[in-house]
Amino acid sequence: MLAACILCGAQYPLAAKPMRYRCTCGGLLEIIQSFGHVEAEKMKDLFHKRLGERHSAAASGVWRYKELIAPDLPENMIVTRNEGNTGLYEAPSVQAFVGIRRLWLKAQSENPSGSFKDNGMTTAVSHGRSLGYTGFACTSTGNTSSSLAMYASTSGDSSLVLLPDHDISINKVLQTTAFGAKVYAFPGSYDDGIKWLEAHAEDLGLYICNSVNPVRIEGQKSIIYEIAQDLNWKLPDWILLPGGALSNAAALGKGLQDLFSLGFITKMPRVAIIQAEGASPFHRMIAQSSCILLPEPCPHTAASALNIGNPPSWRKARWTLDRTNGVTASVSDDEIMEAKACIDRSGIGCEPASAAAVAGLRKLVLAGTIHRDETAVCLLTGHLLKDTDAIRAYHLNNHPLAGSLPLRNEIVHVNLDSDLRSRLSAATGRN
Ligand SMILES: *Cc1c(COP(=O)(O)O)cnc(C)c1O
Ligand SMILES: [Zn+2]
């Protein structure tokens, strides 16, 4: 694999130890793909045929597109859990909530560890193994670590997780622990954790799996490939996604560029990156037409996966906006929780961070940026059970807004007696 610095263009072959994550100038790296001659129609047929695959790496919704993601990676290095292959759903109640003509939800929550991090982690861990690493590390507020722990245990390798000890979801930490990662909680931020890893990982023989790793971004491109394939290579007007570290926004832009330049699609959709108000340095930068990102020193949002003040991939995300005539928005925690309740009630469900995409769509429709007769896909990045505290707070606690939460669904405490019977007959209108 060949990578180039996004600041100065210096190139690095990522084919042997030590793994590089940054250029000597400090810039992040980006994988350069040389697809050679690709016949789009033939390749589409191949991808279509692989949908019937059950027992090889091509059964994965990432490795199905290996030619566009990691063409040189030896097959026997691939660690896969058949990630991807997630549903693209129409949800009429959510569509009515946001008020547009047609909406699909891409349920990345259906990945094996419950978030889209699997799409990139399978490529990162496989690449690390191909370089000879057997120890893998990340710093994470949750989903990255559960995903890493899952793949490392799948391949029989070890994983180490640095856990900033605030604003995390206990479900994700427990999942990481159960999968077998060695977890070190520390007082400090995600940014502190990344800095520490970049300084020490190589000496400790560890391959870093945070989003500074450009190989993860290549795997995450498969999300837009899958959406395109599912929609018969005709993408909607808009793709919306939540933005934290902005790796997924980077991957979306890169994946769209692949599809466009290879002739798989003929029209670029517009991309909207939605941040949580308490952690929205990227949105602020765009809204102020500034060209340098000012980190948010004390990020805070109930959407724990978005709680990042200094997103490493902001330059790549900016490129995605430039390339797709994209926009940004920010949404409050209340708007996020309202959208989440609606997505949960639709039967699909997601964690709070994912709901930011839907909350942002609703806001952009109300503002007139997105027209009611346009079409959109929202990426639902993580599973409903990733954050059970958020569910408890909305449905079961003495929520300060309890009276004005139409979707609140409290548990009713009863005795199994005739009183319950008469209550239920009254409720169902039968007796
Ligand atoms: C990681 C994550 C995000 C944010 O993605 P970035 O690539 O960091 O911007 C959003 N939602 C969920 C559920 C996540 O796990
Ligand atoms: Zn450089």
Image (spheres, rainbow, N blue to C red):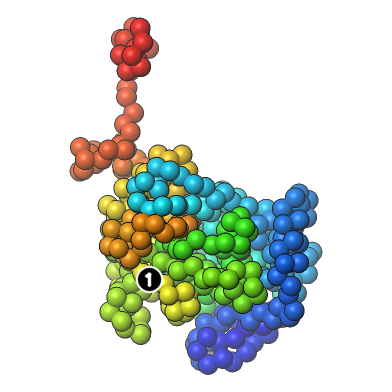
Figure quadrant of the N terminus: bottom right
**Badge 1, how many Cα within 10 Å: few under 14, some, many 20+?**
many
Task: Tell me which amino acid carries mark 1.
Answer: Val
Task: Tell me the residue that label 1 is attached to.
Answer: 327
Secondary structure of residue under mark 1: strand
Q: How many marks?
A: 1
Residue drawn at x 43%, y 40% is: 346
Residue 172 visible from this viewpoint: no
- Report x, y in % for residue 107: 52, 51
Going by the picture, which residue comes out furthest to the front? 373
Instruction: Decide which of 213, 2 is in the foreground and name it.
Output: 2
Residue drawn at x 59%, y 51% is: 86
The image shows residue 393, relative to residue 154, as above or below, that is: above
State yes or no: Cβ of the residue under disc 1 lies below 8 Å from any atom of ligand 1: no
- Report x, y in % for residue 238: 45, 63
Residue drawn at x 35%, y 17% is: 428
Figure quadrant of the C terminus: top left
The image shows residue 67, relative to residue 155, as above or below, that is: below
The image shows residue 414, relative to residue 291, as above or below, that is: above
- Report x, y in % for residue 119: 60, 61
- Report x, y in % for residue 262: 65, 75
Q: Quadrant of residue 425?
A: top left
Residue 69 visible from this viewpoint: yes
Instruction: Decide which of 261, 387 is in the foreground and name it.
Output: 261
Residue drawn at x 31%, y 10% is: 422
